Amino acid sequence: MNNQNNIDTLEEALRIIWLESSKEADISRSELEIQNILNADYAVEMSASKQSAMMEKLNITLATPSFGHVLNIAMSQKGITAETLAAKTKLPLEIIEDLKIDNIYTNNVPVMLFKNMLKQLDISFKSIEQSIWKTFSTLKSREFANRSFISQPAFRRSQNSSRDSFMKLNSKTDGKELYENEEALKNYLTKLENLMR
């Protein structure tokens, strides 16, 4: 691993704190503080066991394919197109396309239709459970990243303070967020496992 590109999180956090407090601070004192922070030699090292545990977990995460990847492989092995699969399983083509590119939470698909799709492609529950979790975490992190870039500054919030404008902004979810949480996915997977026995 290239040590030149490592970022010390403590150092970065202290820089941010310093930059935020610099708005009201005395410049000469602030310069002394930042010099102390940057020049200090912190002797914090991660133990070898923690390093190996972290790398092992990272390898497991990277080795697990997403559900979309598993679906694409199964479809190509069976020689089934998305249109054919849609016709055989009664799933809308858009849903299958979204599943293929990990653009939809799997538990937003009705469990019976999802089970039929898996049976059609001869995919076992055990082979996809971890993939579904990976897709879930990928979508959650994507959602978090999108939310942080879309948020408005506080001084502009009053422009959208009316109930109508708020509803227009938030009508995109249409209640799907009820199924986009960990507990809902656990329940979905339990039901799916029982149906596939």
Image: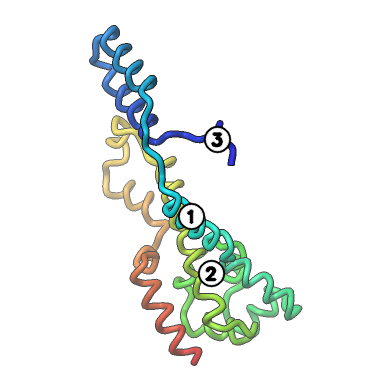
Residue 41 falls in which quadrant of the image? Answer: top left
> Gap in Å between the C-alphas at discs 1 and 3?
17 Å
Q: Where is residue 189 in the image (x, y as percent from the top left)?
A: 43, 78
What residue sits right under mark 1 in the picture?
52
Identity of the amino acid at label 2?
Ser
Q: Nearer the viewer, residue 72 or 33?
A: 33
State which mark lies toward you, 2 or 1: 1
What residue sits right under mark 2 in the picture?
131
State which mark lies toward you, 3 or 2: 3
Q: Position of residue 144 (x, y in %)?
A: 41, 50
Q: As drawn, is 112 to the left or to the right of 161?
A: right
Q: Nearer the viewer, residue 159 or 113?
A: 113
For marks 1 and 3 on the same chain, the one whose residue lies earlier in the sequence: 3
Give the crowd class for mark 3: few <14, some 14-19, many >=20 residues within 10 Å.
Answer: few
Q: Nearer the viewer, residue 92 or 33?
A: 33
Color style of the picture? rainbow
For marks 3 and 2 on the same chain, the one whose residue lies earlier in the sequence: 3
In the rendered view, tell whether residue 68 sits above or below residue 46: below
Residue most extreme to the right: 79
Residue shown at 46% from the left, 60% from the top: 137
For marks 2 and 1 on the same chain, the one whose residue lies earlier in the sequence: 1
State which mark lies toward you, 1 or 3: 1
Residue shown at 63% from the left, 72% from the top: 71
> Gap in Å between the C-alphas at discs 2 and 1?
23 Å
Identity of the amino acid at label 3?
Asn
Residue 182 falls in which quadrant of the image? Answer: bottom left
What residue sits right under mark 3 in the picture?
3
Residue shown at 50% from the left, 35% from the top: 6
Identity of the amino acid at label 1?
Ser
Residue shown at 52% from the left, 80% from the top: 126
Q: As drawn, is 41 to the left or to the right of 2?
A: left
In the rendered view, tell whether residue 48 sits above or below residue 173: above
